[in-house]
Image (tube, helix red, strand yellow):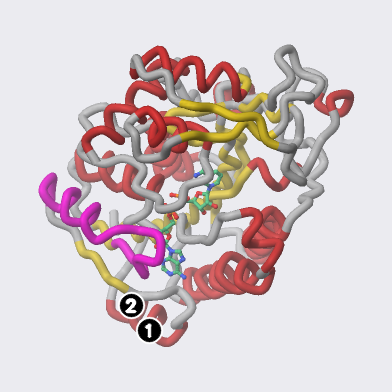
Amino acid sequence: MNILVTGGAGYIGSHVVKLLLEKGKDNITVIDNLVTGFKSTINDLKKIRAFDFIEADLSNWDEIKGIFKSRQFDVIIHFAASLIVPESVKNPLKYYLNNTANTANLINLANEYKVEKFIFSSTAAVYGEPTKEEIGGGIDENFPTKPINPYGQSKLFSEKIIQDTAKANPKFKYLIFRYFNVAGASPDLVIGQKSKNATHLIKVAAECATGKRDKMYIFGDDYPTPDGTGVRDYIHVLDLAFAHIQAIDYLDSNRSSIFNVGYSKGASVKKVIETMKKVSGVDFRVEIGKRRDGDPAILIAKNDKILKEMKWKPQYDSLEFICKTAYEWEKRY
Ligand SMILES: NC(=O)c1ccc[n+]([C@@H]2O[C@H](COP(=O)([O-])OP(=O)(O)OC[C@H]3O[C@@H](n4cnc5c(N)ncnc54)[C@H](O)[C@@H]3O)[C@@H](O)[C@H]2O)c1
């Protein structure tokens, strides 16, 4: 089994590569341009087991084609992307080029070089800004997709390209994972989230708890939620990574599909901050700021489909554990 991982030097990709290496997979190739990924992460992963790392940019289509020409792949796990929502509003073309055009090129190469399995990182951002009434008991995979920013749109376009390709070429199978809010670190602290200027709540709270930031903001405390702050479905990065490992075998005997990946429960911003303070024992400064554009009040996955069809069994479904691993990692990093 020859596996190509794009974006494997990044946060989520590196956790998947780690699991693959621990499972004894030894034909892994990682392509990453290190724009937001880290060579040090690759070096830490190489201590587990050898694999090939190619520093290349997916926008260099000739170079990427050369890689496909010289190597055989059975599966592509495609994480590489740009993912900062406000940046996508300011610079939409960066997102359509990096996330959509480069994905289209990758799929084109997959077809040309007969790679039949494609696993794609999509996002809850494809659902846009659902209202409380629309959400009801949570968001399932049939919920209308109405992205409200170019990031979400760039991922939705990629989903369509993947689906249309599979319709035209029945040998090409895909799994699209729509991630909710990913957080935490590998419990052995070998790797974790290194992202610079992070905007992810748990990462920011961990940076406050370790004194790397002097304060943080709650963006809006007047939402129609129990404590007035936004509610999100936080998933531990390793549970998400497990889903990718399962996906490889799943595609041998099952059809292409789209799965939400979350725990089907939410935590408010205040709850997350309180939990980070509890696990760290540090009472860092928090201020109330204005709401940010495009932040829905509540975003919670319905995960019935992945639980039933993939028999995915989350192991780290605990906000305390997520915050604890994020904090311990931040202390170490
Ligand atoms: N982090 C989250 O909460 C979250 C939520 C939903 C979806 N996602 C999706 O998960 C995927 C991984 O996200 P992450 O949090 O690990 O981000 P990340 O920035 O840590 O990882 C992305 C990796 O892709 C690489 N990359 C980007 N553009 C590239 C290019 N043109 N060529 C080669 N390499 C390139 C980066 O250097 C980085 O290593 C993304 O597709 C993202 O849209 C993430």
Q: Which kind of residue does numbered mark 2 sit on? A: Ile
Name the residue at 29% across, 48% down.
Answer: 17
Name the side, left or right, on which 128 lies relative to 163.
right
Residue 225 covered by magenta stretch: no
| Residue underneath mark 1 | 63
Q: Within the image, what quadrant is residue 221 found in?
A: top right
Q: Could you give the CA–CA distance between mark 2 and mark 1, rounded to whole angstroms?
A: 6 Å
For the record, the magenta segment spans: 30-49
Compared to residue 257, the image places residue 234 above or below, namely: above
Q: From the image, which quarter does the N terminus lie in?
A: bottom left
Q: Contact, CB < 8 Å: mark 2 with mark 1?
A: yes
Query: Against 239, is 294 above or below?
Result: below
- Asked whether residue 204 is in view, the answer is yes
Between 108 and 92, the residue placed more toward the observer is 92
**Residue 276: x and y, percent?**
43, 21
- For mark 2, what is the residue? 67
How far from the left and from the top, in percent, is residue 42? 22, 56
Residue shown at 56% from the left, 39% from the top: 179
Q: Tell me where residue 58 sits by quadrant.
A: bottom left
Lateral position of residue 194 relative to residue 164, left or right: left
Q: Residue at x 37, y 28 (%)?
A: 209
In the depicted structure, whether residue 60 falls above or below residue 93: below
The image quadrant where one finds the C terminus is top left
Q: Residues within 10 Å of mark 1 (few under 14, many from 20)?
A: few
Residue, far bottom: 62
What's the amino acid at mark 1? Glu
| Label 2 residue SS | helix
Task: Name the image quarter holding residue 192.
Answer: top left
Q: Is residue 38 magenta?
A: yes
Left or right: residue 215 compared with residue 97: left
Which residue is at a point 28% across and 79% down the rendered structure image?
Answer: 70
Q: What x and y, as percent, mark residue 30?
A: 30, 61
